[in-house]
Amino acid sequence: MRIEVKKPASLLEVLQSAFPESSRTHLKKMIRYGCIRVPECVTMPGGVVRQAEYLIKAGWHVEVRKYQEREAVRERPPFKILFEDDSILAVYKPAGILSSGRTTEKVRSMFGMVNSYLQKSTRGMQRAYTVHRLDREVSGILLFAKSEEAKFFLQDHWTEVDKYYYALVHGIPPAKSGTMQSWLKENARQVVYSVKNEVPGAKWAVTHYRYMESFAWNGQKVAPVLDGTSSTALFSLLRIRLETGRKNQIRVHLSDMGCPIVGDRKYGGDDKVKRTIRLLAYSISFPHPVQQRRVHIEIPMPDGFVHIGSTNEY
């Protein structure tokens, strides 16, 4: 949308005249998040004005970009984009890649790749901001912000974020659903473990699970037995909801329950199984930093995720 300014006024006043139904808070967010461009303002990179009180002269024009999901039309990035708009970029993180840190010839990180992509595609006008992390061995949805404001908003509202995982575990859980909670502490070997009481350095962690189905070898579904008696089931698929987000939290809690994640040798997984951790961050829902709505992103379970010992194993 392009607005021609008839008389001198602040940028916020121009927008209030053009959008009388919008609140001042919403308009200020649009300004702060880079939705407003003034072509005649040559002192600002790209003409993007981020100050609500900036004086717009008569005869100037104000261009308003709408927030909307869109596929990238720029150079194809070296990762899969799941969602993108002017505030947020959600990508798929494969297992074995760090969430944050610099990307080098020997070490790859999603932050390094995403930041490089944004810097190149916007000629340095945008960069990536880390919102949260996934363990290096875990795959799934990873969020990045495109501004500090968006980053701080999401982190300040993180208790309103719903995060779900698929976990393929050894054995059968003691009940169809349950909650695991403990204090988690990390030792010098970077192994996280549960402690009964709060001690220095320990962090409180809460994990909810729901049983979905059981499998034998090669992904064959079998009837479960959840009363502790014998069963032909070797593996169980669980749906995990995180209430807190501590390092290795799901992996430790499932191991404590007697159902370590398949492929997770660090926390008790059978070393006869392929060393690929079957833990996927498949769903996330969060309040948008600018738009007054929630964003929901979900990805399907990868082929071979439950097919232990088959040719198409994950």
Image (cartoon, rainbow, N blue to C red):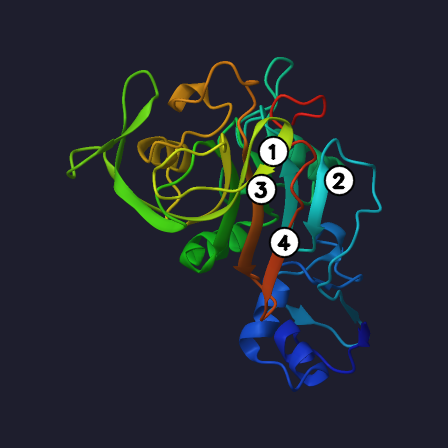
Q: In which quarter of the image is the N terminus?
A: bottom right
Q: In the rendered structure, are the residues bearing label 4 and label 1 in contact, judged by CB atoms less than 8 Å apart?
A: no
Q: What is the secondary structure assignment of the residue under circle 2?
A: loop
Q: Tell me where residue 126 appears, x and y as whole percent.
A: 67, 44
Mark 3, other Cα within 10 Å: few <14 / some 14–19 / many ≥20: many
The answer for how far apart the CA atoms under marks 4 and 3 are is 10 Å
User: Nearer the N terminus, badge 4 or badge 3?
Assistant: 3
Query: Relative to 84, does residue 279 appear above or below in the rendering?
Result: above
Identify residue for label 4. 297
Mark 4, other Cα within 10 Å: few <14 / some 14–19 / many ≥20: some
Residue type pointed to by label 1:
Val
Q: Select label 2 or label 3 by which is in front.
A: 3
Identify residue for label 3. 142
Horizontal relation, residue 53 to residue 226: left or right:
right
Q: Which residue is drawn at 69% across and 78% down?
A: 14
The answer for how far apart the CA atoms under marks 4 and 2 are is 28 Å
Residue nearer the viewer, 3 or 54: 3
Identify residue for label 1. 306
Mark 2, other Cα within 10 Å: few <14 / some 14–19 / many ≥20: few
Residue nearer the viewer, 73 or 81: 81
Q: Residue at x 58, y 23 (%)?
A: 96
Mark 1, other Cα within 10 Å: few <14 / some 14–19 / many ≥20: many
Q: Tell me where residue 233 appears, x and y as whole percent.
A: 50, 33
Residue 24's tag is none
Identify residue for label 2. 123
